């Protein structure tokens, strides 16, 4: 489970056959999906302030591919 306010890196958004939007994200190096309605996109000002903490690339953006039989969910 992710705590409210956790920052995630968005990779892509997909719509399933039930017309639900899911967003693929990276959190602490783990790739998974979050239902898009639970995400809030940072404003440009918020994003710039957050990114200013990191040089050159945030380490949590790096992720490892899980084995093919691993669960892709986050939390």
Image (cartoon, grey):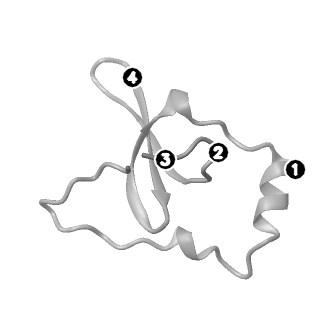
Label 3 element class: loop
Where residue 21 sits, quadrant-wise, is: top left
Does label 1 or label 3 sit earlier along the sequence? 3
12 up-or-down from 59: above or below: above
Q: Are marks 1 and 3 in contact (CB under 8 Å)?
A: no
Which residue is painted at 53% across and 27% down in the image?
A: 37
The residues bearing labels 4 and 1 have C-alpha atoms spaced at a distance of 29 Å
The residues bearing labels 1 and 2 have C-alpha atoms spaced at a distance of 17 Å
- The location of residue 22, given as percent across then percent down, is 41, 35
Does label 1 or label 2 sit earlier along the sequence? 2
Q: Which residue is mark 4?
A: 20
Does label 4 or label 1 sit earlier along the sequence? 4
Q: Which residue is mark 3?
A: 2
Label 4 element class: loop
State the residue in front, 74 or 25. Answer: 74
Question: Dot 1 surroundings within 10 Å: few (below 14), some, or many (20 or more)?
Answer: few
49 up-or-down from 52: above or below: above
Q: Which residue is mark 2?
A: 5
């Amino acid at each position: 489970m992710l705590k409210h306010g956790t920052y995630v890196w968005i990779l892509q958004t997909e719509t399933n056959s039930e017309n639900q939007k899911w967003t693929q994200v990276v959190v602490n190096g783990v790739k998974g999906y979050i239902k898009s309605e639970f995400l809030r996109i940072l404003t440009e000002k918020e994003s710039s302030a957050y990114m200013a903490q990191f040089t050159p690339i945030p380490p949590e953006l790096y992720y490892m591919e899980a084995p093919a039989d691993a669960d892709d969910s986050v939390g």
